[in-house]
Image: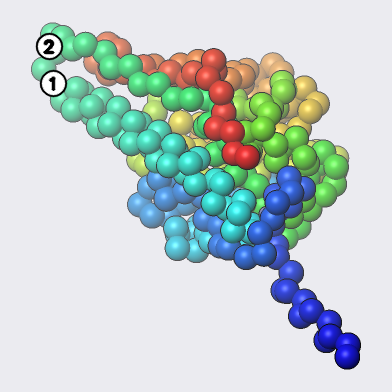
Amino acid sequence: MNEPPAKRTKEIKCYASALGNCSHIQSEEHYISRSFFSNNMITVEGQKWLNGKTKTVSYKKVGLKILCEYHNNLLHPIDTAIAGVGRKIDALLEKQIKRSHLPRGIPWKKDIYEINGFVFEQWMIKAVVGCMFENENLRWHQDNSNASSPPIEILQAQFGLTKLKYPMGLYQVMGVGEQFQNEQRAGIVHLSHIETKGVVGALVNFRNLQFLMYLHNEPDLGIFESWNGTTFGTGYNEPVYRPTEFTFATKGMISSILKFDWQSSPINLP
Ligand SMILES: [Zn+2]
């Protein structure tokens, strides 16, 4: 007697499938961790130079069926780590505001906060890749693949198997003397290549710190505007590759230093 053919399981969508070991359970991935949100809302923009469509989303709406359960679970330590980063920056900003109200001449000891730069990059990649699913027209410049199959070296860096190689990685994009805004903002804007319109990275506003997450292997970043409208590129402000520290001052004195540690390793997710 012939056995009936095994019932086909519903196709699992997982953008990390190239890494292997996918489970047969679909999960919903919150591609942007809760700690990224200020006021529970963030702005996600489409390609900066194409149609520039802006979308504001709330935390509840950023869950998408884009990873299998196995790969989604692997990413949890990154969310936990980034929540810690958010708390450090919140504490730092709170202290700076308090100090700005102190009478002049009262001394303080500057605070030092440290962040693992590569783990921050892992989280950035996760957010940038996840946001691509919000706009079905977005494709990767690197190999013209769509959102559901990111270039392998980007996936490997996201899961901590390798580190991104220059010029890929995190850049600080704040102009000289650019002030931190007190108004809390958070957002992600994809940047596209001028010819192919493919995604080469994204501008990310994290607690009003401005970053470029560059995910393309050509060293020419071109000319672009930061989230705050400052122009970057040859002849303009220079983006700083893997910044080592941000200094926060008030009343002409340093209040805190936020250090990015680039000696540690990324979180290796098997
Ligand atoms: Zn998977």
In the rendering, which numbered label is found on residue 77? none
Quadrant including the N terminus: bottom right
Label 2 with label 1: CB-CB less than 8 Å: yes
Residue drawn at (26%, 13%) of the image? 110
CA gap, disc 2 to disc 1?
7 Å
159 and 126: which is toward the camera:
159
1 and 212: which is toward the camera:
1
Residue drawn at (61%, 19%) of the image? 241
Task: Kindly tell me whether residue 167 is visible in this rendering.
Answer: yes
Q: Could you tell me residue 154's position as x and y percent?
A: 71, 37
Instruction: Give the labeled residue for mark 2.
Output: 106
Q: Could you tell me residue 102's position as x and y percent?
A: 13, 21
Ligand 1 position by quadrant: bottom right
Q: Residue furthest right?
A: 2
Specify whether 238 is left or right of 178. right
133 and 210: which is toward the camera:
133
Within 10 Å of the Cα at label 1, are there few (<14), some (14-19), or many (20+) other Cα atoms?
A: few
Q: Could you tell me residue 172's position as x and y percent?
A: 55, 24
Amino acid type, residue under disc 2 in the picture: Ile
Residue drawn at (25%, 25%) of the image? 96
In the rendering, which numbered label is found on residue 102? 1
Q: Does the residue labelled 2 lie within 8 Å of ligand 1?
A: no
Amino acid type, residue under disc 1 in the picture: Leu
